[in-house]
Image: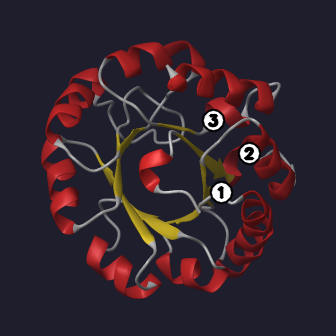
Amino acid sequence: SRLIEHCRLYAILDTTWLAGRDVAVVASQMIEGGVDLIQLRAKKESDEEMTALARSIRKVTNTHEIPFMINDRPHLAAATGADGAHVGQDDLSVAEARRIIGSGKWVGKSTHSLRQALDAEREGADYIGVGPVYATPTKPDYSPVGLGLVRQVSSQVKIPFFCIGGIKLENTAEVLAAGARRLVVVSGILQATNMINYCRALKALLRN
């Protein structure tokens, strides 16, 4: 499986935006479009349901050697053979998550300020999410952090960081101009009329 440093386009397969589609098909299309990393986010599903979805996606990601992450539930990462878990500010600490999923797995952490970003780096996170950069329907309770935070993090944080939150094809260029090299896209990909082409277009901008 590739190293986190080599991952540029991070797709979150959020069940909220599935609209009845099969997760394995969606994951395949994301990968065909050039996505480097896939996370399953299933806020409403039970552990059993999430495990079934994760196993289905894991088959696809394994075939293509694409890293696969579980959102918020490190105990399921171990059970489903995922490459790691992503935790939020209100979830477990990086150390606790790592203890649950075992060594050699990735732990990512969401951050919403420079202090949180530096703390997560100190805690030993493998990467951080920085955002929400823009207002996003996926996280309505969070106020956008804006491009200023992206600039600060890019100059002060050494571990890989992925910008997240309201990122779409049309605002990608300005996020990259602020110092980002990696992006997380959720609803932009899942609501695209053609996910493969949408991912390819995002990836083309990230290659520059």
Q: What secondary structure is found at the residue carrying circle 1?
A: loop
Give the amino acid at mark 2: Ile
Q: Which residue is mark 3?
A: 187
C-alpha span from label 2 to label 3: 16 Å
Q: Which residue is mark 1?
A: 66
Q: Residue at x 56, y 83 (%)?
A: 78
- Quadrant of res 143: top left
Q: Check disc 3: other Cα within 10 Å, few if <14, some if 14-19, many if 20+.
A: many
Q: Is residue 139 left or right of residue 99?
A: right
Give the amino acid at mark 1: Ile
Q: Which residue is mark 2?
A: 31
Labels 2 and 3: the sequence-earlier one? 2
Q: Are marks 2 and 1 in contact (CB under 8 Å)?
A: yes
Residue 75 percent location from the top left of the image: 51, 83
Residue 49 percent location from the top left of the image: 74, 74
C-alpha span from label 2 to label 1: 8 Å
Q: Is residue 206 left or right of residue 196?
A: left
